[in-house]
Amino acid sequence: MSEIVLVNLSGQDQPGITSSLMSILAEYDVRILDIGQAMIHDTLALGILLELPDKTQDSPVLKDLLFEAHQLDLRIQFTPISQPEYEQWVRNANQQRYVVTLVGRSVTADQIARIGRAITDNDLNIEDIVRLSGRSPLHDEDPNSRACIELTLRGRPHSVDSMKADFLDISDELGIDISFQEDNFYRRNRRLVVFDMDSTLIQQEVINELAAEAGVREKVTEVTEAAMRGEIDFTESLRQRVALLEGLPESVLQRVAHRLTLTEGAERLIATLQTLGYRTGVISGGFGYFGRYLQEQLGLDYVHANELEIVDGVLTGRVSGPVVDGERKAQLLQDIAAQEAVDLAQVIAVGDGANDLPMLRLAGLGIAFHAKPLVQKSARQAISTIGLDGVLYLMGMKDSENPH
């Protein structure tokens, strides 16, 4: 009967290790059942699961591996695996897989420990840990630094809702974003990304900027904040706010557009998405004039927003056409996906307000970005600690893979 052996090697990395070890195994016709390697600071950890055929029972294959490891200055350990253990391991391959992504300015042992306990308490097992962010300098004073670790899990959680609630508590207490996703076919196969505009793609709420020009900023800000908290119906809040802009000259729009600032990471995110062939767009409860301004700046494929009514070069205090509220956003998302022949599971939607929730829930990956607490709790995923390019981490992309 064949024998199954797990071989673990560790030590300083150097060229030729894999070739040397595989040459020995090939000489004895050893079957490789599994193999995995990790590198941390030039230190190698290599695991090989072997099936030794009957004819090798009395052969020196393991002695040859031991000798070669000594020559390469590697530590080596042999662990016999019983056939029932191996068969159980194979059966476990059919267990559901999940991905937990930790995103922040830095990642600490305390954060990982708390998240690890929540994972264990839900009867899940960590199968793999990968750093997605780039290597950090020892003294990193960059205020826009990023850190991300991705954990792959197997098993079936006792309660997905309960675990997400635990993650949200940890996030609030320790200042880390925690994404929990099913690891399925669509996760690395998104094709369309749409953004809210105000306080998401740009830092400002445009209507507040227009209100400042009209001298009614305080009044408009009060209504805007209530709408973002979900306390006022969006359509009614929009009507109230736009009415306060009556008489504002059209020329003000250009002046406001020129002082808009993109959110941290927005340019990098969109440039990366476009390089990879993604379609991008804005679906906003803001105003089309500013959406088209950003479209020209960033090369967006779609812009859908409210249109300010202008007569004789002056704002009338009304919008023309259908109001882009929460339900309209969801419908526009479906329309764009259908036009692009993209499954909704392949869509990413990013927004910050209560009126974004319908499209966030509809998209395969809906992300609340620096959102109010109500929106964070209602959305499936949230980013609150870093810039908009943190979306790339939730897509499973490494900094080392990113051309931008």
Image: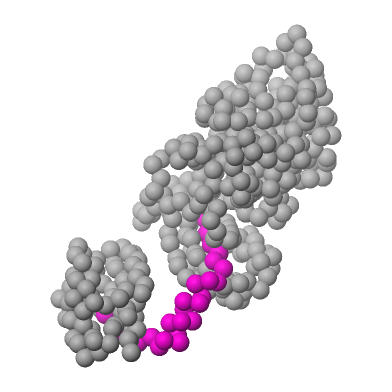
How many numbered marks are there? 0
Work out whether 202 lies above or below 164.
Answer: above
- The image's colour scheme reads one colour
For residue 324, above or below residue 140:
above
Outermost residue on the left side: it is 71
In this view, the residue in front, 134 or 110, is: 134
Tell me which residue sits at (46%, 78%) in the image.
89
Can I make out residue 104 in this image?
A: no
Task: Give left or right: position of 171 versus 357.
Answer: left
Q: Is residue 249 magenta?
A: no
Residue 280, given in percent of the width and then of the height, sits at 56, 36
Residue 255 x/y as whole percent = 62, 19
Residue at 77% x, 40% y is 327
Percent x, y for residue 191?
54, 43
Where in the figure is residue 196, as x and y percent of width and height? 65, 38
Q: Is residue 19 visible?
A: yes
Which picture quadrant has residue 296?
A: top right
Magenta highlight on residue 90: yes
**Which residues are the magenta region?**
76-105
Question: In the picture shown, does residue 295 fall above or below 71?
Answer: above
Residue in the picture at 38% in, 42% down: 403
Looking at the image, residue 113 sits to the left or right of residue 404; the answer is right
Q: Specify the quadrant that holds the C terminus.
A: top left
Q: Quadrant of the N terminus?
A: bottom left
Name the residue located 62 percent from the left edge and 54 percent from the top edge: 381
Q: Nearer the viewer, residue 137 or 114?
A: 114
Q: Residue furthest top?
A: 312
